[in-house]
Structures are given as C-alpha cells and as structure tokens.
Image (spheres, grey):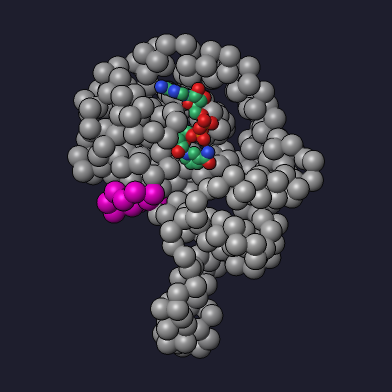
Amino acid sequence: MIKKIAVIGCGVIGKGWIIRFLAHNKHVIAYDPDKNLEKEIVKEIKITWPNVKKLFNRKKLFLKNFKFVTSIQDAIKDADFIQECAPENYKLKTKLMKNIGTYAKSNSIISSSSSGLLPTIIYSKCKNPSRSIIAHPFNPVYMIPGVEIVPGKKTSKKYLNKANKFYKSISMKPIMVKKELPGYLSDRLQEALWREALHIVNEGYASTKDIDRAVEDGPGLRWSLMGTFLTFHLAGGKAGMKHMLEQFGPALKLPWTKLKAPKLSKKLSMRVINGTRQQAKGKSVQKLSNIRDEYLVKLQKLRKKYEDKIRK
Ligand SMILES: NC(=O)c1ccc[n+]([C@@H]2O[C@H](COP(=O)([O-])OP(=O)(O)OC[C@H]3O[C@@H](n4cnc5c(N)ncnc54)[C@H](O)[C@@H]3O)[C@@H](O)[C@H]2O)c1
C-alpha cells in the first residue's frame, strides 16, 4: 500500500499534488531548494481546501500529514512513491533523477510530472529505470482527474500497472500512453491550438479575448464531455464519422493551419500579455483560480451524470 509520498519541487504543480495527496489521506514529505516555500504551501492548502473538500466529499484536512524538509535525501529515503515536479529541463531532470535513484528505497515508484520530456532520457542516469515513469498532470492537479502515464523504454509493466492503480486510488483517471513521444498526447494537442492562436494574434485577426471566446463559447463547451473524435462523429449526422470524413476530409488539404510557431517577438508577447491582463479585469491569479476551482467542482459533478450515460 502506498502511504508515504515524497514531492520533489513545490511550485505550481508540486503544490497541486501535495493538496491532492493530502485529500486522500497520504503522508506527504515535500522538498524544494527554496527553503521559504513551506509557509506558501500551507497557505495554498488552506485556500483551496473548501473546494477540494467538496469535490472529494471530505470532512477534515489532516495538515499533520504534511512535512516540509530541506534535504532531498530525507524526503525520499522512506517514500513509497516519489512525485518529481522540478523545472522542465532535460539537464536538470536527468541529474535530479540520478540523485533520486540513489536515495530511493527498493520498490518505490519514481514518477515525473514532466509536460513533454522523454522518460528514457530523463531516467538515463537513474539506477532504477524499470520503476520510473512519467505522470503528466493538469493544473490544478487537485481538481483535474486526467493524468498521462508514459513509460520509458525500460519501464516494467508491473510498475506501470501499480502506478495506474495508485493514481486511480487518488481519484484520478489515468491515460496510459502506449509508448513515449515528445509532448505526450494532450500537450501536443494543446500546443497545436496554442500555435494557431499565436499566429492569429500576431497577424491581427483577433484579440486574445476573441480567440478565448472562440474556444469557451464554441468547441470548449463540448470538449469536457466529448473529445475531438466523438464530437466530429456527431457532426457527421446519421452516418457519423464516415460522412464527416467525406465532407470535411478535403479541407485538411487546404490547409487552414500554419503548424510552425510564430516568432515570439516583443510585439506579439506584449499583445498576448496585455490582452490576457485586460481579460483578467484586475482580478489576481489567486482570485481567478478560486473562481475556476468552484466552477470545476460543479462541472465535474454535472459531468459525472452525463459521462456515465455515454461510457456505460
Ligand atoms: N504549470 C503547469 O501547468 C504544468 C502542468 C503539467 C506539468 N507541469 C510540469 O511540472 C513540472 C513543474 O512545473 P511547475 O509549473 O510546477 O514549475 P514551477 O516553476 O512553478 O516550480 C518548480 C519548482 O521546482 C523547484 N526546483 C528548482 N530546482 C529544483 C531541483 N533541482 N530539485 C527540486 N526542485 C527544484 C523550484 O524552486 C520551484 O519551486 C515541470 O516538469 C512542468 O513541465 C507543469
């Protein structure tokens, strides 16, 4: 049974994992080279708790199950599971995984939160690649159930299955990727959308707000229930995907998209930064996050009802 978890790196994602683990009665030992983070983490646990508690139907927050340490070895040595959340950088993660592998107890699973790096590379110097995986979450980790599990070339099936079971036990819905690829599944998709959005802003066709509305008031409303394939199956009428491909297949050759990212010039960066600042209407990231969390709790409860109708 996985009870003690080490969280290595406590930025946006590390904090998110800590909150999810605590909400599922795990003991968390967190490490970050920034020794001043402890207070910030506790503050975030408390701020998010009212929504987290509703989502998982919890009564009590066990803050005593959380510990912050300033030595990576202390964090790892007794952990059953290690969730790494350090910056996205091959050199840094490869070195860190070598270090983690040295201190990890036998049988513990080592899991990286990377958004798109190849596990075979980041675990290339780690002593235990067979029990090392990627588990790519989504922000906010304490609210979003999806997590992409990506094996490296040396990851064993046994540990992949264990990881799958573990993430399910903390109310997540693992997506088991068959083999490693850069950007995995969702970030590859998100990046395609992001690149096109940047081109549109760069060429002056629309503001950041207009593009966001094109997602929020259009496909985004459907996407949380049905992804691209099932959505397009319905768009094909009675014949479903078959008619969809006949009708819109040729458009793939036009092509509408640019694929290569535009240069992040100063002008483009300023348009994007100022555009999103205006969209925030003076609300802080914290304030917007609270609104988003409250919405995500209600949305997931609603979605559960309809999701069951489709998937069962
Ligand atoms: N932000 C997101 O939306 C998101 C989503 C999914 C996955 N991720 C992935 O999660 C990981 C962390 O991203 P983040 O957004 O939390 O970054 P972040 O910059 O918010 O936090 C990184 C933390 O790592 C710490 N750190 C620096 N060097 C370290 C080291 N050698 N060992 C341990 N900790 C170290 C920093 O002090 C900082 O607290 C990255 O791999 C990223 O790709 C991010």
Report if residue 181 lies within the magenta region. yes
Magenta stretch: dominant secondary structure: loop
- Furthest residue in direction right, as rendered: 282
Name the image quarter holding the N terminus: top left
| Region in magenta | 174-184
The quarter of the displayed image where residue 16 is located: top right
Residue 262: % across, % down: 50, 55
Residue 9: % across, % down: 47, 25
Q: Relative to the observer, which residue lies in front, 138 or 144? A: 138
The quarter of the displayed image where residue 131 is located: top left
Left or right, 281 with reference to 57 = right
Q: Residue at x 48, y 78 (%)?
A: 233
The quarter of the displayed image where residue 165 is located: top left
Q: Residue at x 67, y 32 (%)?
A: 49
Q: Relative to the observer, which residue lies in front, 94 or 185? A: 94
- Residue 277 makes an appearance in the image: yes
Residue 110: % across, % down: 33, 30
Q: Residue at x 31, y 50 (%)?
A: 181
